[in-house]
Amino acid sequence: MNDFDNILICGGGGAAFLEFLRTHARELRLRLRMDGGSTFSNVRSFRVVADYSVNEASANR
């Protein structure tokens, strides 16, 4: 783990996982970072893929 400067926690369950790591892996505490919009990160990713798919389908008509 010495090769990592930061560990980014994201996704809907990120907050719970962050607290688990802070409690059970105290040596990582200073490296842990939480993505500010983690609650909706999966939804945003699905939207990006959907928009891309729609644009590709329209371009191929």
Image (spheres, rainbow, N blue to C red):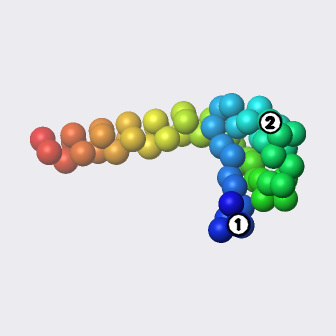
Helix, strand or loop status at disc 1: loop
Label 2 crowd (10 A; few <14 / some 14-19 / many >=20): few
Query: What residue is shown with label 1?
Result: 2
Give the number of the disc on residue 20.
Answer: 2
Q: Is residue 1 visible?
A: yes
Picture disc at residue 34 = none
Three-letter amino acid code at the position of disc 2:
Phe
Depth order, front residue of 40/23? 23
Q: In which quarter of the image is residue 10?
A: top right
x and y percent of residue 23 in the render?
87, 39
* For residue 6, side relative to residue 11 (left or right): right
Residue 28: x and y, percent?
A: 80, 54
**Left or right of 40 in this view: 32:** right
What whole-number distance in Å separates the C-alpha atoms at marks 1 and 2?
20 Å
| Helix, strand or loop for disc 2 | helix
Residue type at mark 1: give it. Answer: Asn
Q: Where is residue 39 in the image (x, y as percent from the top left)?
A: 68, 34
Q: In which quarter of the image is the C terminus?
A: top left
Ranked by sequence position, the earlier of labels 1 and 2 is 1
- Viewer-nearest residue: 55 or 24: 24
Q: Tell me if residue 15 can be seen.
A: no
Q: Residue at x 21, y 42 (%)?
A: 58
Residue at the (46%, 36%) spot, across then down: 46
